[in-house]
């Protein structure tokens, strides 16, 4: 018999031999409840399953065509003054429609800002990023830095940074919020502080000044360390250009680029990662099984995804999710490239020391 099969048989035998809660006398169980303690062994395999976790998260496709009308209707029903942030959050089907999360660690929501509106300043413990989905003329001010919001841009609002939103344009602006909110809720560490609108500094943002070109950063004196989050805006125009150029020179390898802190090379936010992806015409990608959970936002293009055998047909501005160790297949059947941004919790798992990839 194959050694692996023998191990599996031993594991199954050990699992089935574990005692059950029902095996314990009723008066003993009552005493355990009174003492607010519990036996580990009946639940050990739920908490520590063999070989791989058993995720609660299930995959789901959220179509922009379905969400957009609901969001615009929310703009008529609820003024921003009463909402503070006018958002429709995406909910993991396995956790129900009131769950403010798409995976165990990731929150996503579609936010609307109408012309002339201003969303008040606040700061909070979770970190956030905004992927601009539609519209022109809006901006975010982060700790005094005014960041224009163009389609496809990623705007960071790290935990503890003051930020507010404004709209000087003529059409609705919609963006996708990504936060590590579920993690902070689990840690009993989630809260926000409100303030007045910020006065922006009279200069372009750092993506247009200090960090305009890859591989170049300003010199620092020893008594002037680099800021913790030196770049708050990642313009999509440059990202797409870099992806297209990479595609010309890397054969048939996956065309992917991570959004990083330009001073350190680490992920742009502490526990959330963002990866820009380009699918060539006709290309199919089968990434390794990853221990991280993820959501994919389609910047432009259309195609299909198979997540653990469940099929999704996605198009521009749609979003879909994938649980941990998901078997993923992405296909672009068209004649033009497709561009996506993968939002994931790899940085968190790397910090905890257990990120893993499997063939």
Image (cartoon, rainbow, N blue to C red):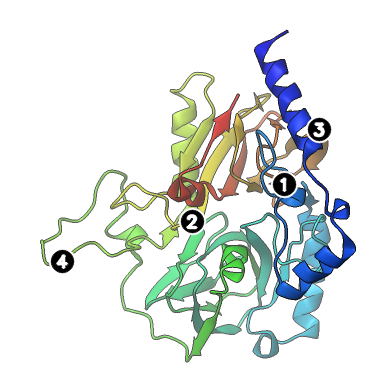
Q: Nearer the viewer, mark 4 or mark 1?
A: 1
Which mark is first along the chain, 2 or 1? Answer: 1
Residue 199 placement, left or right of 319: left
Q: CA distance from mark 3 to mark 2?
A: 28 Å
Percent across and percent down for residue 341 are 58, 46
For label 3, count other residues whose C-alpha is less than 10 Å away and answer few (under 14), some (14-19) or many (20+). Answer: few
Q: CA distance from mark 2 to mark 4?
A: 25 Å
Q: CA distance from mark 1 to mark 2?
A: 19 Å
Residue 115 placement, left or right of 99: left
Which mark is first along the chain, 3 or 1? Answer: 1
- Is residue 306 visible from the viewing direction of this image? no
Viewer-proximal residue among 350 and 60: 350
Viewer-proximal residue among 18 and 356: 18
**Residue of label 3:** 309
Q: Nearer the viewer, mark 2 or mark 4?
A: 2
Please name the residue shown 32% across and 63% down the image.
228
For label 4, count other residues whose C-alpha is less than 10 Å away and answer few (under 14), some (14-19) or many (20+). Answer: few
**Residue of label 1:** 55
Marking on residue 224: 4
């Amino acid at each position: 018999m194959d050694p692996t099969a023998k191990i599996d048989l031993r594991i199954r035998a050990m699992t089935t031999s574990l005692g059950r809660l029902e095996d314990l006398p009723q008066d003993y169980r009552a005493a355990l409840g009174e003492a607010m303690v519990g036996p580990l062994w009946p639940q050990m395999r739920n908490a520590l399953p063999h070989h791989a976790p058993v995720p609660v998260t299930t995959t789901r496709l959220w179509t922009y065509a379905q969400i957009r009308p609901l969001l615009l209707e929310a703009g008529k029903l609820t003024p921003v003054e009463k909402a503070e942030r006018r958002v429709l959050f995406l909910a993991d089907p396995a956790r129900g429609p009131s769950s403010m999360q798409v995976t165990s660690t990731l929150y996503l929501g579609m936010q609307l800002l109408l012309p002339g509106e201003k969303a008040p300043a606040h700061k909070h413990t979770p970190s956030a990023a905004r992927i601009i989905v539609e519209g022109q003329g809006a901006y975010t001010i982060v700790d005094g830095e005014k960041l224009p919001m163009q389609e496809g841009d990623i705007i960071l609002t790290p935990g503890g940074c003051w930020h507010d939103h404004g709209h000087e344009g003529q059409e609705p602006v919609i963006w996708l919020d990504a936060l590590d909110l579920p993690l902070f809720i689990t840690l009993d560490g989630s809260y926000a502080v409100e303030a007045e609108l910020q006065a922006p500094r009279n200069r372009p943002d750092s993506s247009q000044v200090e960090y305009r070109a890859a591989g170049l950063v300003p010199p620092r004196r020893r008594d002037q360390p680099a800021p913790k989050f030196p770049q708050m805006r990642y313009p999509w125009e440059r990202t797409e250009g870099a992806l297209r150029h990479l595609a010309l020179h890397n054969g048939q390898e996956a065309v992917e680029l991570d959004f990083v802190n330009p001073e350190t090379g680490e992920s742009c936010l502490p526990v959330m990662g963002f990866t820009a992806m380009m699918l060539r015409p006709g290309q199919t990608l089968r990434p390794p099984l990853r221990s991280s959970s993820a959501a994919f936002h389609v910047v432009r293009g259309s195609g299909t995804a198979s997540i653990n055998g469940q099929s999704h047909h996605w198009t521009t501005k749609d979003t879909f999710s994938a649980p941990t160790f998901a078997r993923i297949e992405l296909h672009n059947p068209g004649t033009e490239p497709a561009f996506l941004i993968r939002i994931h919790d790899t940085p968190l798992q790397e910090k905890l020391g257990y990120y893993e990839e499997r063939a």
